[in-house]
Image: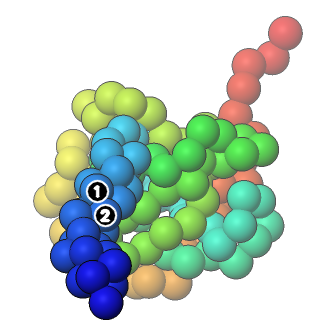
Amino acid sequence: MRIFLVFFLLLPVFAQTKSQSSNDQKKTIYYVQSVYSQLHQNPSKFSRVLSTFECGQPFYVLSSPISEFYQVEYSNYKGFMSTNVLSKRKPDGCWQDMYRRFFDQIEIGVTEIHYWGRLQDLLIKGESK
């Protein structure tokens, strides 16, 4: 009986240290660098898209890169985002911020945002030799 009593008294202490360690794990913040980028269910650019985010959006990075994708978290979204579109520094040249009045006046629907994000996702970026 005493063992159970001690166990139940120490249970909140162990639960608290576990939650603190999970909070410490997601300290690294990365920002979206492209106009629109997509959050995927799996670490592949052909996997199901969970949502599309715009330039400058912050994400908590939960793991080191897995086949060119970071496992990230934003609010209640958890998924994978390409390492090509994330950076540790917040971008200065986001079109949505530079041309806010223009973006506010044009009516871009969810479908168009998804397709722009898909284009950015499938675009191969690099330099020629």
Q: Is residue 25 left or right of residue 62?
A: left
Q: Looking at this rendering, what residue extends furthest in the front direction?
A: 1
Q: Looking at this rendering, what residue extends furthest in the left direction?
A: 101
Residue 118 percent across, percent down from the top left: 64, 65
Q: Which residue is mark 2?
A: 14
Residue 115 appears in which quarter of the rendering? Answer: bottom right
Disc marking residue 17:
1
Which is more toward the observer, 99 or 30? 30
Q: Secondary structure at mark 2?
A: helix
Can the viewer see residue 78? Answer: yes
> Label 1 is placed on what type of residue?
Thr
> Label 2 is placed on what type of residue?
Phe
Disc marking residue 44:
none
Residue 11 percent across, percent down from the top left: 28, 74
Can the viewer see residue 93? Answer: no
Residue 17 percent across, percent down from the top left: 28, 56
Q: Quadrant of the N terminus?
A: bottom left
**Crowdedness of circle 1 by 10 Å Cα count: few (<14), some, many (20+)?**
few
Residue 25 percent across, percent down from the top left: 39, 47
The residue sitting at 49% across, 69% down in the picture is 78
Q: Secondary structure at mark 1?
A: helix
The residue sitting at 77% across, 59% down in the picture is 44
The residue sitting at 79% across, 67% down in the picture is 46
